[in-house]
Image (cartoon, rainbow, N blue to C red):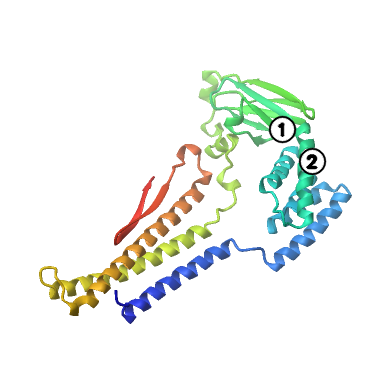
């Protein structure tokens, strides 16, 4: 196959340059912490360490959490867990220790990281013994809204053992058409306790007199089921979705341009070749025709896959605040066959 003419090489080069630029944006979206981030994290860690030494656990928790958000490291996670233990938030502390153990450290890691991993192994065992377990049973409504100290409990966690911080807790339950009910409970460290709340149904005359706006709003009901409302969620990060859409758009543009050139070459061959047989003078057009078909097919596949991926990411991000009943599964996979390409999926 002969080399592409200059106009085709220029087009292919521009397409590759566009994809490279957009891929660079995607890389920067997940780039390493900057020097300023690292300096800030070190300063926050020093403040957290000083607060931890004086049992100022609130300040320590804040500083170590911020530092780890800037530069993730097992040393910061372990110190954050220690501050949470000081605040009595044992469930969160247990998860922070577990994170260090799940991520592990490499054999050639710095010794402070190895020591943090070893400390997490020892300290998590102590936390396991101190965790309290609470089982909440609700009698009456089929889909009650349950909370502990005002924090919603997911429906899947009702009726089963749930790790809970020791101390004085308040269990509340409510449901449309039922009188709400609450019960205080004192959980000792390492204890297991059951709480059974029987909700009383409202009589018909009371229900008839209850204003329509007295029923929990849809957002409130979702929050009571352990699903935060849209206003309580941070804005979704759609950076990667936009990058994927950009790549897809570039692919579709390249497909359109190469497709036009492909049709032009096809027209030339149709006019000059007899009975689908081309003579040597037309070989350059044949080569260009075949090459443009491949480039056009690949560009179409990249374009459709990029757009589909970007739209899928946007939908998943935007649907994170909706109920699970409205959540849809989206599966997208590209395919390439000869001179054609595209995507198949299930929505």
Q: In which quarter of the image is the C terminus?
A: top left
- Residue at (65, 25) in percent of width and height: 136
Foreground disc of the pair 1, 2: 2
Q: In which quarter of the image is the N terminus?
A: bottom left
Residue 48 appears in which quarter of the rendering? bottom right
- Residue at (40, 67) in percent of width and height: 250
Residue 113: give x, y in percent of width and height. Answer: 76, 54
User: In the image, is 37 to the left or to the right of 287?
Assistant: right
Residue 44: give x, y in percent of width and height. Answer: 78, 58
Q: SS of the residue at dot 2?
A: helix
Residue 217 appears in which quarter of the rendering? top right
What residue did someone put label 1 on? 164
Up-down relation of residue 309 to residue 216 (above or below): below
What is the C-alpha distance between the residues marked 1 and 2?
A: 21 Å
- Residue at (35, 68) in percent of width and height: 253
Looking at the rendered structure, which numbered label has been put on residue 234? none
Furthest toward the left, the residue is 275
Residue 128 makes an appearance in the image: yes
Residue 202: give x, y in percent of width and height. Answer: 56, 20
Name the residue nearer the viewer: 157 or 208.
157
Name the residue nearer the viewer: 304 or 110.
110
Residues packed near mark 1 inside 10 Å, few (<14), some (14 to 19) or many (20 plus): many
User: In the image, is 286 to the left or to the right of 316?
Assistant: left
What residue did someone put label 2 on? 122
Name the residue nearer the viewer: 340 or 200.
340
């Amino acid at each position: 196959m002969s080399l592409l003419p200059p106009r085709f090489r220029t087009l292919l080069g521009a397409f590759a340059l566009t994809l490279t630029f957009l891929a660079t944006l995607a890389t920067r979206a997940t780039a390493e912490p900057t020097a300023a981030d690292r300096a800030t994290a070190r300063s926050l860690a020093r403040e957290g360490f000083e607060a931890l030494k004086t049992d100022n656990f609130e300040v320590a928790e804040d500083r170590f959490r911020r530092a780890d958000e800037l530069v993730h490291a097992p040393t910061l996670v372990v110190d954050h867990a220690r501050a949470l233990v000081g605040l009595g938030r044992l469930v969160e502390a247990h998860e922070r220790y577990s994170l260090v153990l799940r991520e592990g450290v490499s054999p050639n890691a710095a010794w402070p990281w190895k020591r943090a991993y070893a400390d997490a192994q020892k300290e998590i065992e102590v936390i396991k013994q101190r965790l309290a377990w609470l089982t909440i049973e609700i009698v009456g409504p089929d889909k009650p809204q349950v909370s502990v100290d005002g924090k919603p409990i997911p429906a899947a966690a009702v009726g089963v053992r749930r790790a809970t911080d020791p101390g004085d807790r308040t269990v509340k339950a409510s449901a449309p058409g039922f009188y709400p009910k609450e019960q205080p409970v004192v959980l000792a460290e390492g204890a297991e306790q059951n709480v059974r709340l029987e909700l009383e149904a409202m009589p018909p005359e009371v229900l008839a007199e209850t204003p329509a706006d007295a029923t929990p709003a849809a957002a409130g009901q979702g929050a009571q089921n352990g699903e935060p409302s849209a206003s309580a969620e941070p804005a979704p990060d759609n950076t990667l979705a936009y990058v994927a859409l950009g790549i897809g758009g570039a692919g579709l543009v390249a497909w359109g341009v190469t497709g036009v050139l492909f049709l032009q070459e096809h027209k030339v061959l149709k006019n000059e070749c007899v009975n689908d047989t081309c003579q040597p003078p037309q070989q350059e057009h044949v080569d260009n025709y075949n090459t443009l078909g491949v480039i056009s097919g690949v560009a179409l596949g990249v374009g459709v896959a990029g757009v589909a991926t970007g739209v899928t990411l946007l939908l998943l991000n935007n649907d994170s605040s909706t109920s699970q009943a409205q959540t849809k599964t989206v599966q997208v996979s590209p395919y390439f066959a000869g001179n054609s390409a595209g995507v198949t999926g299930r929505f």
